[in-house]
Amino acid sequence: MNAPLPSEGLWFLSQYCRWGLLKTIPDRAYMAHIAEAVSQTAHYRAAASSLGLRTEPSEPHTSVLMDGRAWDGKDALAYAESFAIRV
């Protein structure tokens, strides 16, 4: 399935925070709201349903990224804050 995942948007937002690209660090609930809005999961679900495709809820997920660090979509900033190099 290639559904958009808001937790992937959270990863980008966490990196914007890490590198000082945001003037203030938004609280976690607002970051989740932004990621959900940008991902357009409701539009995806509607389109997939109209085609008879199965849709699943877009839950935050955990992954181990290429750098070997764990990314937890439930705590987007923890990953960015785990690096010694950040702005």
Image (spheres, helix red, strand yellow):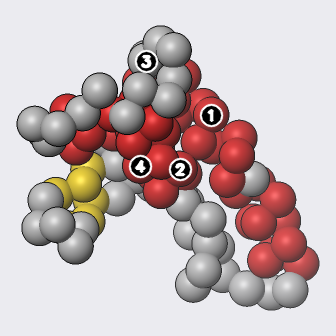
- The amino acid type found where label 3 is placed reads Ile
SS category of the residue bearing label 2: helix
- Per the rendering, the mark at residue 42 is none
User: Which of the two labelled residues, at mark 3 and mark 4, occupies the earlier sequence position?
Assistant: 4
Cβ atoms at labels 2 and 4 below 8 Å apart: yes
The residue carrying mark 3 is 25
- Per the rendering, the mark at residue 9 is 2
The residue carrying mark 1 is 34
User: Which of the two labelled residues, at mark 3 and mark 1, occupies the earlier sequence position?
Assistant: 3
Question: In terms of depth relative to the viewer, which is nearer, 70 or 85?
Answer: 85
**Residue 7 on image: x %, y %:** 46, 51
User: Which of the two labelled residues, at mark 1 and mark 4, occupies the earlier sequence position?
Assistant: 4
SS category of the residue bearing label 4: helix
**Residue 42 on image: x %, y %:** 76, 54
Residue at position x 59%, y 42% in the image? 35
Badge 1: residue crowd in 10 Å (few <14, some 14–19, many ≥20): some
